[in-house]
Amino acid sequence: MKKTFILIILLALAGGLMFCRQADKQDRRTYKLALTDQEVQDINSLVGKNELITRSYHNLMSESDQALSKGVEVPPPGESGGYEHEKHKQNYRDMKKTGIMFRLTGDEKYARFIKDMLDAYAEMYPKLGPHPLAHNQKPGKLFHQTLNETVWLLNTAQAYDAVYDWLSQEDRKNYEENIFNVMVRWFTEEYPHEFDRIHNHGMWMAASVGMIGYVMENQDWVDMALYGTKKDGSGGFLAQISQLFSPDGYYMEGAYYVRYALRPFLFFAEAIERNQPEIKIYQFKNQLVKKAFYSALQMTYPNGAFIPINDASRSMDINAPGMVYGTSLLYDRYGPDDNLLGIADIQNQVYLNGAGVKLANDYARKKVKRPTWESIEFTDGQDGKQGGFGLLRTGEGDDQTVLSMKYGVHGLGHGHFDKLHFMFWDQRREVIPDYGFVRWINIEPKFGGRYLPENNTWAKQTIAHNTVVVDQRSQNRGNRKVADKVHGKRFFFETDNPDLQVMSARADDHYPGVKMHRTLFLVRDEDMEYPFVIDIYRLESDEEHSYDYPLHYHGQIMASSFDYLSHDAMLKPLGNAFGYQHIWNEAEARPEASGWVSWLSGHRFYTWVFSGTPDSKFYFGRTAANDPNFNLRTEPLFVLRQTGQDHVFASVIEPHGYFSEAAEVSRNAYSTIRAIKVIGHNDTGTVIHILGDRDLEWLATVYNGENPDPQAEHSVRFRGETFNWTGNYSLSKIK
Amino acid sequence: MKKTFILIILLALAGGLMFCRQADKQDRRTYKLALTDQEVQDINSLVGKNELITRSYHNLMSESDQALSKGVEVPPPGESGGYEHEKHKQNYRDMKKTGIMFRLTGDEKYARFIKDMLDAYAEMYPKLGPHPLAHNQKPGKLFHQTLNETVWLLNTAQAYDAVYDWLSQEDRKNYEENIFNVMVRWFTEEYPHEFDRIHNHGMWMAASVGMIGYVMENQDWVDMALYGTKKDGSGGFLAQISQLFSPDGYYMEGAYYVRYALRPFLFFAEAIERNQPEIKIYQFKNQLVKKAFYSALQMTYPNGAFIPINDASRSMDINAPGMVYGTSLLYDRYGPDDNLLGIADIQNQVYLNGAGVKLANDYARKKVKRPTWESIEFTDGQDGKQGGFGLLRTGEGDDQTVLSMKYGVHGLGHGHFDKLHFMFWDQRREVIPDYGFVRWINIEPKFGGRYLPENNTWAKQTIAHNTVVVDQRSQNRGNRKVADKVHGKRFFFETDNPDLQVMSARADDHYPGVKMHRTLFLVRDEDMEYPFVIDIYRLESDEEHSYDYPLHYHGQIMASSFDYLSHDAMLKPLGNAFGYQHIWNEAEARPEASGWVSWLSGHRFYTWVFSGTPDSKFYFGRTAANDPNFNLRTEPLFVLRQTGQDHVFASVIEPHGYFSEAAEVSRNAYSTIRAIKVIGHNDTGTVIHILGDRDLEWLATVYNGENPDPQAEHSVRFRGETFNWTGNYSLSKIK
């Protein structure tokens, strides 16, 4: 694998022209994107005095100087994840950083670096055709997909603005003719559909064209960026953000993609505010910018990692560049917020502009605590009426317990077939996890870092999630077009009582003839060591079906209430399609009635207690069968299988005890709750009986009708006994 | 699982007797084990002034006060890992801590707590018979094995000494008659063989009897503790330490057990020094105490975790109680050492006595860095002539690279059949790991936290290690008695050149008719990103054998140089005995010649490049087949299989590149080294050719004769070419 490239070192070549390069004072124009003189002065006055500003400044200077020390290298285009691809990405990052450093220090070495880089691009770019390795993507010229090229432009536009005054007219003409005009034409004339498409790629494209439009004072480009190539509002930035985000600011593709979409969103919003304040972008659609950013922040776990729904990296977090920018920006544009200071504390930096100055000054003055978010429900769909995403939280700061459920729209090409999927975070880790995407991002030997086939065959399938699979087929049979037309339905979301928070949702259009209704309780109880979860999942059908309830976990099995048959001498997959082909069937059992299984994860034990019937089957599974290229991680799951028409899966997930191998300490390896029974269920309600150690007992109910009402009285009669309750659910402790 | 126990709360009952409890000043005797008045004064004067003393003091006070707040509870004996078992352990810890707090504060509430506790034990203990749940262990009375009971005594003796003066004569008589006499008789009369056995259990027993002997001024017990029950030196503490440790201080059971054995070792050594200084225990056997402690410290990875050879926890580290004590003690008894300050920095505490004061004062004055240990070889066996354990290190502090090889004795009942096994630490993690023990320590549902059957069937077997398996059978056929009679042999260990450190060892008595010789190079090279490993493993036999070279790893497979057949629709075990029954055969290949396979672990990629022949077979394996109770972790390994009489496995393990999923950055996913070939080998030497990207080439040689000599000239001729080198090995870069 030899890397061949043209190493272009132009450093110091430009020295001869230097004397005429500095524009006269009277030529200076307003900065469109770069730091104003006031911002430069404010930042410089804090360096060495303010902790966050000083660290951010020195990090940026160090990175800029490293870039300079390596010299300018503009290789021909290469493969995704390969050297050349990464180099072009590094180049736009370096240009952006050195642009800021040039503004902050006035040191011409930074400006020269940008000029040398742009000279090289201006030389090469006009000669490039479409990238040959597009692999079904819309090709850029520098990169295999236009997306990367728009990111290049959005960053380079900022660097170009920073040195605009310093450059000669001739330079500007060279770059504008040979780079920016060519690139913008490529986007707007070759790919108008991509430009106007409601999708994060479209947002990037619009924003990048708008940014360079502001710098070049090309209002035509800016108008296309704002209103679409037809300038009629059918595409463009304002349409993008209106349709990609729900009125609550929830982003249909999920948090992993929103942090990426937020970069053009926020940078362009700020550019609009600085150049066309009459648009009042920060007030647009009831402060949609604020809502979108806060919804992204609230879609995080206490460690700052984004909740990985849909195609998502499990380690992407609020340290992502757009998130650091947004934290500073929102703190300034929408006013102080202690949770933003807490976020900045995790990020350990600010963005170097006026907004960052404001945040850093308050950070230095105040006692900062890690952010504590409240329970919240996000509505989904551009009208906010297509289901949503619910988040129940309890505890404070790092030590929060988080229970989430997904019941919104499918989420376009990155969506998963996972309606009523839930995740559970406890003890600073995802205890009931989402698998995330199947992709080794940017790793060349793994298909250039792109999505792998198992992303479709495993990660998107219903069985890869914590939600019921009917007849061992994925929701909507794994057909995205069908799935995009339907959505989950919120039923109720009640979090007034901090000891008993409950959310309930339905999915009636994901399996023909089967209605699904899930209710999740997050309970704090003085007799229990940690908050625990009650899950009531009801299925209704006129036909006989097989229902699989999967529960994914991490860790080591400790014990179970039932015997099982271990397939420990030969493993076969649990099925042959819809993701089942990827699960090894490690063991199986017939628990016959309520049972439990416990595992160790980190310093805590967890027990899943489930209702059962005489025909219950239980499987111990593990990925990854039918994975010939070792693309999947090896992870365990349980599957509880029932057959029937109407059925209720009732479960408890209980964290308990403590284990430290280093300290050789273990306590409470057995759970408190030991059995759970479905007393009955009908169109009015479901009644559940929970039994624990020390004679503990609870009754849980949930309302199954229409029109949820916290004041309504309900009554059901099962097995000769009458159960009454008020509201949409109840949980009462019998002993 | 209801827990039934007698809750004895005696707090405040003793109030009436208080006036006569304080002994007259003239009655006061010298403390035998507890803090002297000078130590008390020194510590108290530093609280609030010195960081380590203050933290240690407040931690101890907080733990002591928590113990008091829970009251005194002495339940009947229970099962290992169960509530009662843990409570008795907590009780001796609490007594010891409150004893120190009583000395430091003089507050009688701490003394009363100890008195109430001892009252309860004195009431119960004489009535107890042997523990009913011994499971093949020597039963104690409070605990299922005498080992725990000796730990109880060693700690309680210290608490008893702390309150001795404060107690009434009547109390002392009560405890001595009803607890200590009974317990010591149980040890010395029922289990003289256990007492005198050379084993860590024997050391605990001797030390605990010696400690209470000093407190009760019972020189008979002390003499038994020092010289064995027969007082002839055939057993007892001095024999124990002479025989359990090599002259270098290396402990044959490995580091996990040494940190446990060091507790009685160090506490009793200090007790001897304070009570019988004429023994000169700290000078005994050429400062064996010092060597033993330092060897334990050096058997750690840069994060402080012990290298997990033999039966061992992978997370036990230098924060273990005995290690904190030893760090303070050795700093005082053998003089200042910056590495001990570095260890105290990881521990973040000192032991509260005069030694801790000395260390804490220096810690406050000096700039402390994390410890950096040098490469070192430990000889094994009580004569130091039974092989050893080699450790090659490069880098500094946290960022050290560590390569280790085990070539000593078997190591008694906790030994593994793993001679010539190697481990590789890089990037703050064990990259080529040891599995450790199969045990979920102290977890009740996992067989009470004891060793599980898979410890024998997997963890001890040769295939569970990184060393060659002959004919798919473990060394010495897995027979401990046979293995205890043989040992590995050191060949050479040369670390003068920091860029090229090499160790070489042999094991000729572990497979009948097969001689094995392994040489490991740790190389730093300016053309390579990180230090890398060269492994030359030579086998000689007159008979045809099958040779399996296993390599255990953690992480995700990225790529391989060869195609393979994936058994991805059905898995079967790789064999049916000697650990092979626990390995699923995930895929297999015929690499035909030199090949490589790469994986991702953490933020780095690793590539194993291996020599091959036309009959090479390659297996991708993963635990855990035939593990019906989910006792094993699921972990991957590779196996390279050859058949032949004489054979050389030549390999390189190369760390390379960088990956961050959160930052979405990946570089150098492919290794630099791509092929390795055995040019030839005979009784004089082995010659290896290593080929890399960018036309890199190396020649490596190793001397195969007897009498290693760094100055000797060697010459071999293979394939018509002559190779000359000086010394035991060479590595030369051709390009």
Image (cartoon, coloured by chain):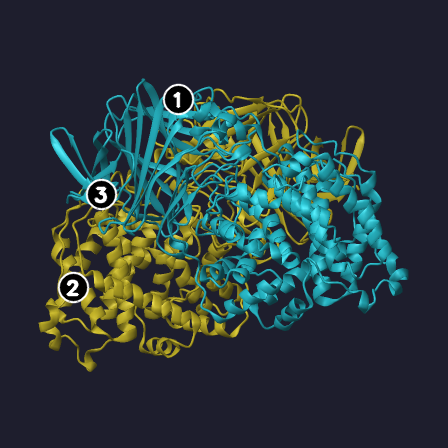
Chain colours: A cyan, B yellow
Give percent across and percent down for residue A521. 30, 42
Q: Secondary structure at mark 2?
A: helix
- Confirm whether residue A69 shows in the render: yes
Task: Name which residue lies at 64% across and 34% down.
Answer: A445
| Residue A205 vs residue A502, the one in the foreground | A205
Q: Amino acid at mark 1?
A: Pro
Q: Amino acid at mark 3?
A: Leu
Query: Which residue matches tag 3?
Result: A731
Give percent across and percent down for residue B438. 39, 38
The residue lying furthest to the bottom in this view is B26
Query: Which residue matches tag 1?
Result: A512
Q: Does B452 sit above or below residue A735?
A: above
Q: Earlier in the sequence, mark 3 or mark 1?
A: 1
| Residue A266 vs residue A303, the one in the foreground | A266
Q: Secondary structure at mark 3?
A: strand
Give percent across and percent down for residue B718. 76, 30
Quarter containing the C terminus of chain B: top right
Q: For mark 1, does the 10 Å Cα neighbourhood hold few (<14), some (14 to 19), or many (20 or more) residues?
A: few
Q: For mark 2, does the 10 Å Cα neighbourhood hold few (<14), some (14 to 19), or many (20 or more) residues?
A: many
Q: Which mark is residue A300?
A: none
| Residue A90 vs residue A428, the one in the foreground | A90
Query: Which residue matches tag 2?
Result: B116
> Is there one chain holding both mark 3 and mark 1?
yes
Quarter containing the N terminus of chain B: top left
Q: CA distance from mark 1 to mark 2?
A: 70 Å
Image check: A462 left or right of A672? right
Whether the residues at callouts 3 and 2 have beta carbons within 8 Å, the answer is no
Chain containing the residue with disc 2: B
| Residue A723 vs residue B686, the one in the foreground | A723
Q: CA distance from mark 3 to mark 1?
A: 32 Å
